[in-house]
Image (cartoon, helix red, strand yellow):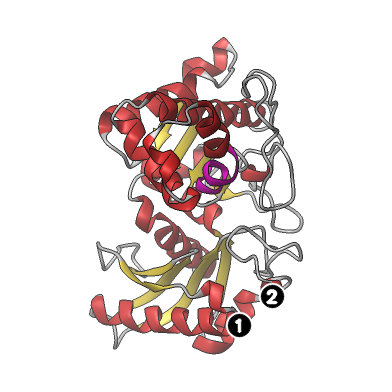
Amino acid sequence: MTVVVGIDVGGTKTNATVLSDAGTFLIDRMVEVPSRVTDGPAAAIEAIAAVFSAVLHEASAVGRTVLAVGLDTPGPATAGGVISRRGSTNFAQEEWWGFDVRAAVEAALGLPVIYNNDGNAAALYAHQRHYGALSAHRSSVSAIVGTGLGGGVVEMGAVVRGASGMAGELGHVHIPMYGLLVEDQPLPHCNCGFDGDLESVASLSGIQNNLLPFWLSQYPSHPLASHPIAAAAKEVRSYAQRGDEMSLKIFEQQAMAIGRMFTIAANFTDPDGYFVGGGVVEAEPHFRDWFLDAVKQHTALRVEQRDVAEFLVVSDLDMAGARGSAMAALNAIRP
């Protein structure tokens, strides 16, 4: 049996999976190592090599022939795997700007490497897992809420990559802010340099940099006011799940922002499915359902569209990037 390996590089962890040439995942759990991306490219490539060896061992596939590696990283990046010259949310250090991560991994592992950004990889996995045999006859748009906002567009079963490979960067789509921001709330700023894009609202960095500081000014006696802002931002979801008024206002703004982006997408691609992934939908069921319903309510669709559209959760999100990368690699080498 021959296999492909899928590797997902994140801001804190790099994880991997193994997929047989017959399309069966040989491991059903997380295999991960610290990503070391903040230590620079050399350290991150060492981490990728480490997780590559570890996942083959865990999947009992050490003796198998590896045909290719599917790799994903946070974008923006070109179709060939060159990180944007402006950097990205998780690759902020200047030594990453314009770095050819695909070629570096290919040289380190001595194998063909097929690259996607992490949003595209997760979107492909969500699409193929949900639609199965109908994947090639369906289209979808995915928004993955994490440290940043990953996204992906799948049209008739294929990821839309664009001329430079940066299609599907939905986190950096500018969205209307009128009616989303309340009186005196500042225009949110994104780490990418944009103001008023989706990621500036619907992401952990959006909470930390924009939403939480403002809402704490409105709720100065809130328990989170005494925490460092980075630590407090990570606690907002747990408060929201318990019905905390301030925290629910933050997530309502995030849901509205995603709905507005989906509204824009509806008029470009008119997809069958709208997927939402990330910690917000891997939360307790009552909160997940509330959030997904809020996204749906804030997505303005025509009657004909609403009759056929599905609003869905990206399943297995922790593994979705690696699995989608493995699927992309297998798709690339199949005759």
Query: Magenta part of the protein: which range?
Result: 203-210
Res. 1 in view: no
Q: Which mark is residue 104?
A: 1
Taking the image as shown, residue 163 lies to the left or right of residue 298, namely: right
Nearest to viewer (mark 1 / mark 2): 2
The secondary structure that dominates the magenta segment is helix
Three-letter code, disc 1: Ala
Q: Residue at x 59, y 17 (%)?
A: 300
Placement of 147 over or under 43, stated as above or below: above
Q: Secondary structure at mark 1?
A: helix
Q: Residue at x 58, y 30 (%)?
A: 257
Three-letter code, disc 2: Phe
Image x and y of residue 16, in percent: 38, 69
The residue most toward the top is 303
Image x and y of residue 116, in percent: 57, 62
Q: Residue at x 69, y 77 (%)?
A: 95
Image x and y of residue 141, in percent: 55, 38
Mark 1 to mark 2: distance in Å? 9 Å
**As rendered, which of 152 and 41 lies closer to the eye?**
41
Mark 2 — residue? 99
Q: Given contact means CB atoms under 8 Å apart, are the residues at marks 1 and 2 in contact?
A: yes
Image x and y of residue 245, in percent: 39, 23
**As rendered, which of 89 and 167 lies closer to the eye?**
89
Taking the image as shown, residue 170 lies to the left or right of residue 4, namely: right
Placement of 170 over or under 191, stated as above or below: above
Taking the image as shown, residue 6 lies to the left or right of residue 264, namely: left
Placement of 145 over or under 78, stated as above or below: above
Find residue 32 and report its image quarter. Answer: bottom left
Q: Residue at x 33, y 42 (%)?
A: 282
